[in-house]
Amino acid sequence: MGCRTLPVHLLCNLMVEHKHSGVSVDDRKLTAVFSALADPTRRAIVRRLASGEATISQLSEPFQMSFQAVSKHVQVLEHAGLVSRTRRAQERPCRLRPEAMAPASAWLGDYHQLWETSFDRLDEHLNNQKGPRS
């Protein structure tokens, strides 16, 4: 019986969690939210849904793209958890799920203090560079 060589695989832990500000942020959710919001069309859809639910047909009205293209954008938002669709008779209205933005908000919030501190130090440095006024 001979030896068998097994391929070497690199394993990545996609369940890494960051604990900042007491909020646990799953990297996959965070990546999905930021990826979904990286596209200007999807951000426009989110803005529209912030004012209330809408069907794909209603969402596609302001865009110069097909119904299918808008539907695919909505699917990306659904995958990220930012949008949900329900069935009402023959319609499937889309609804914004603002709680799904919590991971992104928490992640950005963790860096807010860092940015504020950096800007305060820069302001202090610039004021010191001016020297005393005569």
Image: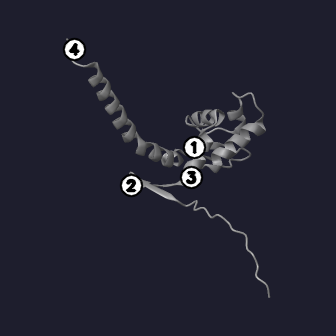
Decide if residue 121 is on the left or right side of residue 98: left
State the image coordinates of residue 105 (x, y, percent, origin top left): 47, 44
Residue at label 3?
29
Q: Amino acid at mark 2?
A: Gly
At label 3, counting other C-alpha atoms closer than 10 Å, the crowd grade (few under 14, some 14-19, many 20 or more) is: some
Q: Position of residue 18 (x, y in %)?
A: 46, 55
Kindly identify which residue carries mark 4.
Answer: 133
Rounded to the nearest whole Å, what is the CA distance between mark 1 and mark 2?
A: 21 Å
Say whether disc 2 or disc 4 marks the residue closer to the N-terminus: 2
Mark 3 and mark 1 residues within 8 Å of each other at the beta carbon: no
Q: How many numbered callouts?
A: 4
- Element type where label 1 sits in the image: helix
Residue highlighted by disc 1:
34
Q: Earlier in the sequence, mark 4 or mark 3?
A: 3
- Look at label 1 and name its amino acid: Phe
Label 3: element kind: helix
In the image shown, does 81 or 106 lie closer to the viewer?
A: 106
Which amino acid lies under the numbered mark 3 shown in the image of this protein?
Answer: Lys
Which tag is nearer the camera, tag 4 or tag 3?
Answer: 4
Q: Position of residue 30 (x, y in %)?
A: 54, 49
Can residue 96 be seen? no
Question: Disc 2 and disc 4: Cα gap in Å?
Answer: 45 Å
Reply above or below: 130 against 81.
above
Q: Which residue is mark 2?
A: 22
Check the picture and name the quadrant holding the C terminus.
Answer: top left
Q: Residue at x 77, y 39 (%)?
A: 68
